[in-house]
Amino acid sequence: MKASEWVPRVNDNYGMLLFLGRSGCGKSGAAASHPGKRFIHDIDYRFGGVGSMIAQKMILSEDLEYEQYPNSAQGFSKFFKNLDKQAVDSVVPNRPNFPAMIQIDSVASFNELLMKYAAAANANVGQTIQFEAGPKIRLTHMGDYRFEINETRDILGKLKSLPCTVIWTGHTIPRWGKKEGADPYADNVILGEMLNARDKFAEDFVSRFDNVFVFDREELNSKMRFTVKFFSNLAKNTFGIGPGAHLITDIPFFVYFKELLKDPKKPTLEIRKVLGL
């Protein structure tokens, strides 16, 4: 295919998306507002946020399924088995029951599953410590981190081949460091935000996505105000949406997003007016 023929994937298949934000900013609910049949891999064991939005009729429960995974090596085995089945189902002709969107909540919990699996598989590798009658703890081994990176890349590669929107959610934390030119003994300051993961993994993981949307919330006049950025120091997109926060309070995210794609430069208040808000 010629490069000139490339266009962003739309028509309810938006490819691979990464939704980031602090806890409680609505990113899981935003993902679950995707139209059509949806499947959520709930590794967080925190379906309550989506459930609350269903109760408020912000999300339809029809055609929405989810599976939860214990925080253990067995939990990762179950997740891998289910994901492998979805990959097999994706090549079935016509795919009548295949989801329009697969969601994974979230990166940090997925990371924990990987390390628990690696610890169980490498039980005799590395050092185990114990003090008096306290718990026996196996210290992390270098092989665990290699497994973490390699298996994550393999799974992302598998997800990219699926004929549906894939949304992975992740929590953000402040990114600390010294300002450029600051005194070496100056205190660290917040320079921005980053994925809640060790630095090397976080950089590698985010770089695998062309589209990273950052969600936020704030209290204003005793009401919660929910926003999303498509372009910032962490957010990025291939849809031509520029910098600036978009107000999505009281709107299912994908209702807003589909309208925005008609004109990526349209101001948020104009879109809300079109939607009757």
Image: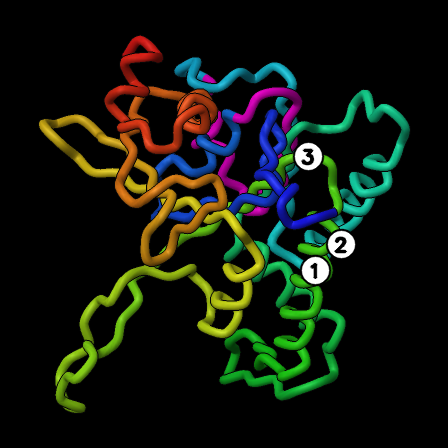
- The answer to whether the residues at label 1 and label 2 have Cβ atoms under 8 Å apart is yes
Q: Nearer the viewer, mark 3 or mark 1?
A: 3
- Which residue lies at the image location 44% right of the left edge and 20% below the top edge? 255
Q: Nearer the viewer, mark 2 or mark 3?
A: 3
* Residue 50 highlighted magenta (yes or no): yes
Location of the C terminus (image quadrant): top left
- Residue highlighted by disc 2: 77
The image shows residue 62 at horizontal and vertical percentages of 61, 14
Which residues are drawn in magenta?
34-54
- Residue highlighted by disc 1: 73
Instruction: Say what amino acid the circle numbered 1 marks.
Output: Ala
Binning the other alpha carbons within 10 Å of mark 3 as few (below 14), some (14 to 19) or many (20 upward) gives: many
- Residue highlighted by disc 3: 164
Instruction: Say what amino acid the circle numbered 3 marks.
Output: Cys
Taking the image as shown, residue 29 lies to the left or right of residue 157, namely left
Identify the element where label 3 is drawn: loop
Identify the element where label 1 is drawn: helix
Relative to 78, say whether 136 is above or below.
Answer: below
